[in-house]
Each structure stands twice: as C-alpha cells, then as structure tokens.
Image (spheres, rainbow, N blue to C red):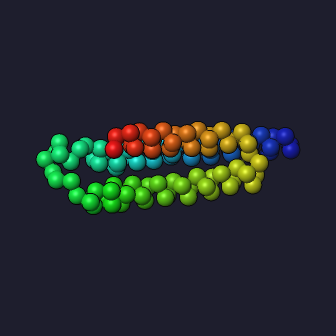
C-alpha cells in the first residue's frame, strides 16, 4: 500500500512538472511574439527613433517575465521543499528555455 501511494505521488509530481514546463513553453513563445515588434529597425519602418522605445518593449514583456519568474520560483521552492529532484529536470529545462528566448530577443535588438 505504501509503495503504491509513493508511486502515485511521484507520478503526480512528474505530471505537475510536465504541465508547468508546457506552460513555460507557451510563455516563452508569447514573450518572443510580444517582443518581436521591437526587432525591426525604426529607420526601416520609416519611423524616427524615439527614446521611449525601450519603455514600450519593457511594458509589453515585463508582465510576462515577472509572472513566469514568480511561477518558476514557486515551482523551484516546491521541488526543493518536497525533495522531488527528478521533477527538477523539467525546471532546469524551463530555465534553459527562458535563457534561449531572452538570447533570441536580445540578438534582434
């Protein structure tokens, strides 16, 4: 009975981590979509460069970044507090995913 309950808990934690990783994939794609309008050179679009462009970029992506940073911090705390180290692999993959998304975004600026 105890072994079955323990397996169910591991399966549940793994399903939660997979679901959170999937949400992070959607969030990273949303981040890139929201950041992409700032990738075009303003001169190419026929606009004059203004000092407010970074604020517009930050205003469009900041809620996404803050929301997912909070979600991932809570997720990491859950992994550490329950010692679900195998579920931590999904958390590390999510961190790598966000690093790649930020690098793609910054490479286009």
Residue at image coords 47%, 54%: 65
What is the quadrant of residue 11 in the picture?
top right
Count of numbered marks:
0
Residue at image coords 70%, 49%: 79
Q: Please provide percent x and percent y for residue 90.
A: 62, 40
Q: Please provide percent x and percent y for residue 15.
A: 63, 42
Rendered-image quadrant of the C terminus: top left
Q: Nearer the viewer, residue 8 or 28?
A: 28
Rendered-image quadrant of the N terminus: top right
Residue at image coords 77%, 48%: 83
Q: Nearer the viewer, residue 56 or 72?
A: 56
Q: Residue furthest left?
A: 46
Vertical placement of 58 versus 27: above or below?
below
69 relative position to 32: left or right: right
Residue at image coords 35%, 48%: 35
Q: From this viewpoint, is residue 26 visible?
A: no
Q: Please provide percent x and percent y for residue 82.
A: 76, 52
What is the quadrant of residue 29 in the picture?
top left
What is the quadrant of residue 78 in the picture?
bottom right
Q: From this viewpoint, is residue 34 visible?
A: yes
């Amino acid at each position: 009975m105890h072994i079955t309950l323990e397996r169910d808990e591991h399966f549940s934690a793994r399903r939660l981590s997979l679901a959170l990783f999937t949400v992070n994939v959607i969030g990273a794609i949303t981040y890139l979509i929201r950041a992409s309008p700032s990738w075009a050179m303003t001169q190419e679009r026929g606009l004059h460069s203004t000092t407010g462009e970074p604020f517009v970029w930050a205003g469009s992506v900041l809620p996404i970044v803050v929301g997912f940073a909070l979600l991932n911090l809570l997720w990491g705390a859950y992994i550490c507090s329950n010692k679900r180290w195998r579920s931590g692999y999904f958390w590390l993959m999510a961190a790598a995913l966000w690093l790649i998304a930020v690098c793609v975004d910054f490479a286009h600026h």
